[in-house]
Image (tube, grey):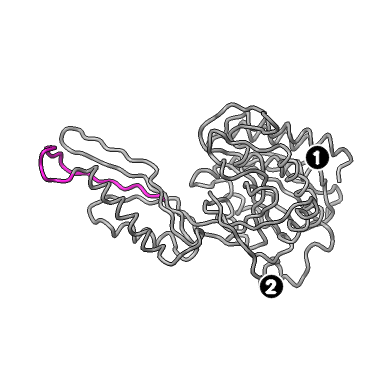
Amino acid sequence: MNSHPEAILTAGLRLLRELLEISSPSGQEEKAVHHLVAWLQQHGFTAYRDAVGNAIGILQPADHIQNPRELLLLGHIDTVPGFPPVTERAGRLYGRGAVDAKGPLAAFATAAALAGPQRGWRIVVAGAVEEEAVTSRGARHLITCHQPHLVVIGEPTGWQRVALGYKGRLAASVRCSRPLSHSAGPVATAAEQACTFWQRVQNLVAELNTGRDALWQQVQASLRSFASSNDGLKETAELQLTFRLPADIAPETFEQLVASLDGEMEFRFWGAEYAYLAPKNTPLVRAFLAAIRGHGGTPGFVLKTGTSDMNVVGPAWQCPILAYGPGDSSLDHTPEEHVEIAEWLRGVAVLTDVIQQLTSTQALQPSFGDNGCARPVGELVLTPVQP
């Protein structure tokens, strides 16, 4: 443990506020990345901005061994658009990213600085770019240059819970074009055809969800926007749709089902991600359970109905992985996004303990195989949450 914990906690909380004060929507993260890199350098990390713009901070002892184990704390520094004022009221810190996910990222940096370098380990804090975009550019680049032994994804779960799974995703643009007709005529307009198509989508989803009681097992369809226009000769209507998919429905399968609903529509699909469910019985999970209990909490497990960088890196790295971070995910992307400062501090304390537990010589037992995922898992109650 670092010998100046109070100073680091104060600096970490200041880092969070400063990151909130820097607008960093997907694709415009550079200023925030430079700020985080500078903070990491000031607190003992070897830190830099990598080839795609991620903020990377590395902690390891000066006398480090060859081929150390790697613990990767993977947060994201981008946010959705919108920049509500950064304020502090009644013990709450408000601002875009306070929950999703500058709050968890700042907690990662602070906890790693508190724990300090650990012999035999490389501790990496990564602030990835473009997580909120369908590109996930930052995470996809990290796959090419890291092969960690343990991964924590920085997403809001609440300080007493960890997330073990995220649903899959598919986005679609559906366009209907037809010759302009008289409003008194019998021919359906492009807008009417688009509305009919949306009803067909809802019927398809209802059919697929028959017998699927758990939200995490269901298909979720969202109409994100509707636009119509005409140029005096042709009228057009366009729908923007997003689908959240369970583990047993692949994006390409669902794409075919949607496209088969209407042979006259024009379709464009993108942003496909497969659902991912992490193993439960791993050293990583056990370390979080112990740390949460150690700070007076009651651990819980959740499955998220949204997506995260876990969907990208989990299948590639095949190592113990989970998501954790202080904050209420129901506030994601809302004008009232905020984190309770007391909860954020508890999250930092849990993360610090986890880092110290995992990097002890007894942390990884050989019975779990090379990736810690070999042993079968028991049943745990998992609660689906939004988003």
In this picture, is 355 found above or below 210? above
Label 2 crowding class (10 Å Cα cut-off): few <14, some 14-19, many 20+?
few
Position in image of residue 53 (x %, y %): 60, 39
Q: Residues within 10 Å of mark 1 (few under 14, many from 20)?
A: some
Residue at horizontal 15%, vertical 39%?
Answer: 180
Q: Which residues are magenta?
A: 171-188
Helix, strand or loop at label 1? It is loop
User: Depth-wise, is mark 1 or mark 2 nearer the camera?
Assistant: 2
Secondary structure at badge 2 equals: loop
The residue to which callout 1 is attached is 44
Position of 43 compared to 98: left or right?
A: right
Q: Going from the N terminus, do you reach mark 1 or mark 2 first?
A: 1
- Disc 1 marks which amino acid? Gly
* Relative height, residue 276 to residue 42 (above, below): below
**In x, y percent, where is residue 152?**
67, 53
Residue wearing tag 2: 375
Which of the 4 image quarters holds residue 319?
A: bottom right
Q: Position of residue 183 (x, y in %)?
A: 14, 37
Instruction: Confirm whether the magenta stretch covers residue 178.
Output: yes
Dot 2 amino acid type: Arg
Foreground pick, 288 / 80: 288
Residue 237, labelled with which disc? none
Q: How many marks?
A: 2
